[in-house]
Amino acid sequence: MANNASHIKKKRKELESHIALALKVANKSGADFAEISIAEDNGLSVSVRKGEIETLENHFDKGLSITVFKNQCKGSSSTSDFSEKAIRQAVKTAVDIAKFTAKDDYSGLADYDELAWDYPELSLYYPWEISAEEATDLAIECEAAALKADQRIVNSEGASVSSHASFRAYGNSHGFIGSFPATSHSLSCAVIGKENDAMQRDYWYTATRDSNLLEDAKQVGKQAAKRTVARLNARKVSTMKSPILFSPEMSSGLIGHFIGAIHGSSLYRKASFLVDSLGKKIFPDWMHIYEQPHIISGLGSAPFDSEGVRTRSHSIVEQGVVKNYVLDSYAARKLKLSSTGNAGGIHNLCVEPGKLSHSAMLKALDKGLLVTELMGQGINTVTGDYSRGAAGFWVENGKIQFPVEEITIAGNLKDMFSNIVAVGNDVDLRGNTRTGSILVEEMMIAGE
């Protein structure tokens, strides 16, 4: 850990010195304001199929982006060369571009008082000293466990191991300069099963910031096989209206549609079915959706956003009512509001779980469809109309009866949100959205 600390300190000093140089040059070049962001990423990715390497990639990417503002006109440039000469040229290019862009009264840096002047350390950096050979062996072990798990597993789409480390740094003319390192590691497997001439595929994966917390490779393979076999001999169901239970993995996408609808750019363009929804009840009165950017080692955690604005825990939906939009500084000015620290996205979006386990959620569903896969992009963000291909399981008397495929589920997101019956405590922690399964009272199923 001492070596890590020394490496982090050295890298931060290096990146922040590049930012300080660029800001100094921008100031001397006549820019009113400037902001600089730097990203460095390096990693290893290995994928195998049937015990053989399919891809092996070591990568290192870096880039410095500069945006300058002159009389409310904006110019941007970037470079992957961090030499003083290249940085000076990038600044000059940005200043030259700003001379030819239109004035925009809403453009500019984030407000001084909103910046993360005292940002927290969130323990996001856990480098994994794994060689290409070790990563390959791990992927092979994972795939082999899946292929051996059941005689009905007849083929593989492969297993993958990835390990990535990054540094992010940002600074602007208000005097703010900040940086932080982060890592992410994952292991996944997808296999194909066959029975009675019918074939199905499914997958499983594990993802964390700390490689020591990854699920065991054999268990990932076995779970991929178990999920695949469970889908064999799937059939259609009749066209009908039915309750729908979204699995935790699918629920995160459902909540993602809500976040997209209250995103600043969608709102000021009037391209959302939730325009003017602030203060209005959209969900049941027990529903609570909030952001927790400072979860230690969280996959979505960040001490500040891509404009240097401090991230903070806050409610987005409280007692079913929209309390906050998702805003960067530009959108906030357009809407006459304040930034919510979401330039660059949301950070650990949490849907407060209920008390029901996954099996209890199935009992609450009683008779209807458990959705475990969605296909297509049939969402109209302006009207909220929702129609997607789906697969999953038919449930009766609270128990899974048979797998289902080749159907479409449809509704309107506004109705779907207001008709949520329950949220499970089977929370999926493998991503930026933390939610359990979500039960919607009724949707249309288009089947036979």
Image (spheres, rainbow, N blue to C red):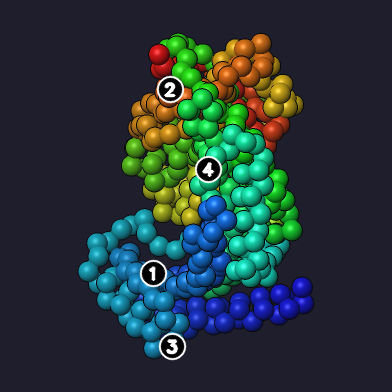
The residue carrying mark 2 is: 407
Q: Which element type, helix, strand or loop, lies under badge 3?
A: helix
| Residue at x 48% of width, y 48% of height | 327
Q: How far apart are marks 2 and 4 (CA)?
A: 25 Å
Residue extending furthest left?
100
Closer to the camera: disc 2 or disc 1? 2
Please tell me whether mark 4 or mark 1 is closer to you in this view.
4
Badge 1: residue crowd in 10 Å (few <14, some 14–19, many ≥20): many
- List the residue tagged with mark 3: 84
Q: What residue type is labelled 3?
A: Glu
Total number of numbered discs in the rendering: 4
* Residue corresponding to mark 4: 155
Q: Distance between the residues labelled 2 and 3?
A: 58 Å
> In which quadrant will I find the C terminus?
top left
| Mark 3 / mark 4, whichever is N-terminal | 3
Circles 1 and 3: CB atoms closer than 8 Å: no
Q: Closer to the observer: label 3 or label 4?
A: 4
Percent from the top left, x then y, of residue 227? 61, 34
Quadrant where the N terminus sits is bottom right
User: Toward the viewer: 128 or 153?
Assistant: 153
Question: Which amino acid, by three-letter code, is at mark 2?
Answer: Ile
The residues bearing labels 1 and 3 have C-alpha atoms spaced at a distance of: 17 Å
